Image: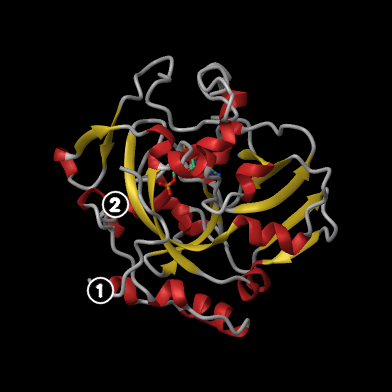
Amino acid sequence: MAYRWKNTLKDRDVTPEHLYMNRRHVIGAAMAGLALSGLSTPARAEDEELVPTDWEDITSYNNFYEFGTGKDDPKKFAHMLTTEPWSVKIDGMVDRPGDYAFDDILSKMTIEERIYRFRCVERWAMIVPWNGFELADLLDLAGVQSSAKYVAFETAMRPDEMPGLSRPVIEWPYVEGLRMDEAMHPLTMIATGIYGRDIPNQNGAPLRLVVPWKYGYKSIKSIVRITLTDEEPPTAWNKYAPREYGFYSNVNPNRSHPRWSQEVEQLIGSGLFARKIPTQMFNGYEEEVARLYEGMDLIKFH
Ligand code: MTE
């Protein structure tokens, strides 16, 4: 069942964890004189399946290969990453290219909470209460030119702070990309928090992409560069294994990974008893995004 993303924000059923507001976010939003609607209105999933995954699971079972390939490596080593100060270079086909300081970006954005389903290509899934803003709002800051057709993203590459970089697991830096209409879609967000707290380093501090209808590897972490371009940008996993990982990477139960079926997924959170549930087309966001791919062969363009 599709998660109705904005309409499920409710005033009731508050847990203290949801209410916690960190200083950085509060200051950022307050400086811009914006209402803290998203943060102060705790979200609740109407469907039992969409009860958010525990903080502990979201922040200790991770993929962030710059810190190692084990699921617990990011939590062990990501504290080595310096996230303050942080800036993002926005360049290419924009009117206002430059280095954008993270704190300046935050001060101009409205932070809201959105509970999204999150589906990794490896078949595990979570439900994450993200805090953040729409990518479209960030791109508007830089002024996207009409010639731009794609957005390319790049993760920080700091060998001294990221022990996983010493091994050529994939070609570093981690890169990702979206088509312009995907990037501008209102579901596409830049996350800066989880459960109302600053996003932990292992989840991609201080800012990471979230595209809820695509496999998790599209949500590139700890972004340092965003480039607007008119050519389809290379992506880390497509370069590694083009037959297995395409540019689009939309969640699709009908398109098997060459080495495993994608028909079911396992909801993290119940330990050994993690539940297996059917994978949904576009991860449950079909109603919102199917029109972006009308007429496209979703098996070929995977
Ligand atoms: N971004 C970078 N820079 N490096 C990575 O290894 N892993 C991706 C994605 N973003 C990854 C990354 C993969 S495979 C997944 S499933 C998600 O991050 C995992 O996000 P999470 O650890 O917050 O659940």
* 53 lies left or right of 173: left
Q: Secondary structure at mark 2?
A: helix
Q: Ligand 1 within 8 A of label 1's CB? A: no
- Note whether ligand 1 is within 8 Å of mark 2: no
Residue 8 in percent (x, y) is at: 34, 61
Q: Count neighbours of disc 1 (C-alpha within 10 A) and say few if under 14, some if 14 to 19, many if 20 or more.
A: few
Q: Residue at x 84, y 43 (%)?
A: 147
Q: CA distance from mark 1 to mark 2?
A: 24 Å
Which amino acid does the dot numbered 1 rest on? Arg
Nearer the observer, 239 or 150: 150
Compared with residue 44, is residue 152 higher up or lower down, i.e. above or below? Answer: above
Marker disc for residue 57: 2
Q: Which residue is mark 1?
A: 12
Question: Of callouts 1 and 2, which one flags the residue occurring earlier in the amino acid sequence?
Answer: 1
Residue 239's place in the image compared with 291, above or below, is above
Residue 201 percent across, percent down from the top left: 48, 57
| SS at mark 1 in the image | loop
Q: Position of residue 138 (x, y in %)?
A: 67, 61
- 187 or 200, nearer to the observer: 187
Residue 267 % position (x, y): 26, 41
